[in-house]
């Protein structure tokens, strides 16, 4: 097994994506982002599955073309089985099944949350792979999890959100402030120009390693309503300080739990993934963790950290090496657990 080519397909949320991996190296990584949801300020499931149906054939074709291989050269098809939106998952799952059947090659099912973590094992110059065991924190618009990773497929969720995901906290706060969707990058940009201690938002009290973000969103809403009642221009006049204060609170919540997780497990190798890992505040905080607590931190290349199919393809490759294949009767699973 020296020259393995695997196609990865991802369709769990609003991105239709396909990637080709050759052994551990990504040859192509194609994403069709569904702009349609921006107008609604969030993902609309009905629209997402329809767009996946339109996108999946061209996206897969493009991934093969960019990798410069014919589909007959593929050794296996890996696809996201879950978790995610059922209608979206069904499109990728049925497409992967029929393609594998037509080519008479194995099918490999992939857990999207494991894939976010295993994206760290893609061969990429300038990026180190974390040694086992390590802690993985996956932070995005759909997820907020801390996972203890003992081996590729030996993972334990030790903390997760009990309500909103951290990216949702960013996006919903941004909506209150009148920023466009997704608001995370915009809040981040303004936060870097503001005073993080200008306004104080209380952190939620959640036991252990779990997270909660819905209270923060409500606190921000009430705060903005109260201030604009006195001064209708409050948001415009203070936007940088408001964003900096929100970011300071959110990063504080993430870091408190990460520190606790590291202390409880004794693990100092910390890997992060998901769209929010692009955030300048979390990157700064991880650097501080390196000097202050002796952590070694890992952040994947950006294109492998937001929802993508390269991470599905690397899991496909790792499972291929273990002869871990899936039968044709496999079904999508919206609530698949790690
Ligand atoms: O991983 P991703 O592309 O898709 C999923 O949600 O699965 O993550 C998107 C999320 C959005 O909520 C977006 O606002 C947030 O990541 N995000 C950020 C930043 N860049 C993206 N949040 C804070 N700071 C950023 N720089
Ligand atoms: Zn994701």
Image (tube, grey):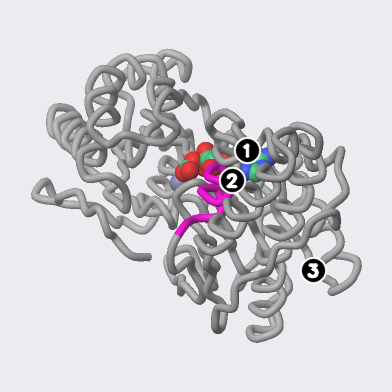
Residue 306 seen in this snapshot: no
Q: Please say if 175 is above or below 65.
A: below
Labels 3, 2: front one: 2
Residue 317 colored in magenta in the image: no
Residues marked 3 and 2 touching at CB (< 8 Å): no
Observer able to see residue 80: yes
Q: Nearer the viewer, residue 219 or 23?
A: 219
Q: Which residue is mark 3?
A: 295
Q: Residue at x 50, y 76 (%)?
A: 158
Find the distance from the CA under tag 1 to the CA under tag 3.
35 Å
Judging by the rendered image, the residue that carries numbered circle 1 is 177
Which badge, 1 or 3, comes first in the chain's sequence? 1
Residue 215 location, x and y as percent?
53, 64
Query: How far apart, in angstroms, are the residues tagged by discs 2 and 1?
Result: 6 Å
Q: Could you classify mark 2 by the number of other residues whose Cα lies within 10 Å: few (under 14), some (14-19), or many (20 or more)?
A: many
The residue tagged 2 is: 173
Mark 3 or mark 2, which has the lower sequence index?
2
Count of numbered circles on the image:
3
Provide the residue span drawn in magenta.
164-172
Most common secondary structure along the magenta stretch: helix
For the N terminus, give its image quadrant: top left
**Nearer the camera: disc 1 or disc 3:** 1
In the image, taking residue 138 as reference, residue 272 lies left or right, namely right
Q: Is mark 1 within 8 Å of ligand 1?
A: no
Q: Residue at x 66, y 64 (%)?
A: 254
Mark 2–mark 1 CB contact (< 8 Å): yes
């Amino acid at each position: 097994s020296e020259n393995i080519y695997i196609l990865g397909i991802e369709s769990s949320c609003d991105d239709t994506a396909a990637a080709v991996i050759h052994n551990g190296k990504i040859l192509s990584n194609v994403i069709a982002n569904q702009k349609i949801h921006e107008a609604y300020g969030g993902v609309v499931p009905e629209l997402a599955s329809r767009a996946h149906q339109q996108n999946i054939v061209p996206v897969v074709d493009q991934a093969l073309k960019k990798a410069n291989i014919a589909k007959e050269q593929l050794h296996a098809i890996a696809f996201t089985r879950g978790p995610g939106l059922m209608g979206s998952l069904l499109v990728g799952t049925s497409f992967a099944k029929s393609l594998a059947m037509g080519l008479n090659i194995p099918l490999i099912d992939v857990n999207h949350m494991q894939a976010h973590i295993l994206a760290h094992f893609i061969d990429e110059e300038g990026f180190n792979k974390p040694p086992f065991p390590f802690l993985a924190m996956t932070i995005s618009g759909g997820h907020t999890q801390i996972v203890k990773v003992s081996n590729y497929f030996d993972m334990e969720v030790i903390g997760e959100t009990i309500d909103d995901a951290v990216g949702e906290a960013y996006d919903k706060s941004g909506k209150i402030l009148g920023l466009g969707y997704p608001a995370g990058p915009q809040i981040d940009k303004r936060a870097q120009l503001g005073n993080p201690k200008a306004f104080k938002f209380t952190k939620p009290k959640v036991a252990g390693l779990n997270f909660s973000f819905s209270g923060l969103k409500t606190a921000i809403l009430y705060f903005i309503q109260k201030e604009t009642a006195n001064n209708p221009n409050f948001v415009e006049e203070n936007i940088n300080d408001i964003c900096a204060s929100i970011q300071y609170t959110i990063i504080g919540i993430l870091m408190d739990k990460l520190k606790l997780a590291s202390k409880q497990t004794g693990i100092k190798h910390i890997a992060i993934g998901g769209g929010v890992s692009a955030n300048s505040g979390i990157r700064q905080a991880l650097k501080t963790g390196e000097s202050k607590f002796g952590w070694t931190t890992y952040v994947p290349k950006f294109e492998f950290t937001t929802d993508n199919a390269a991470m599905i393809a690397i899991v496909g490759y790792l499972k291929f090496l273990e002869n871990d294949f899936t039968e044709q009767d496999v079904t999508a699973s919206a609530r698949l657990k790690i």
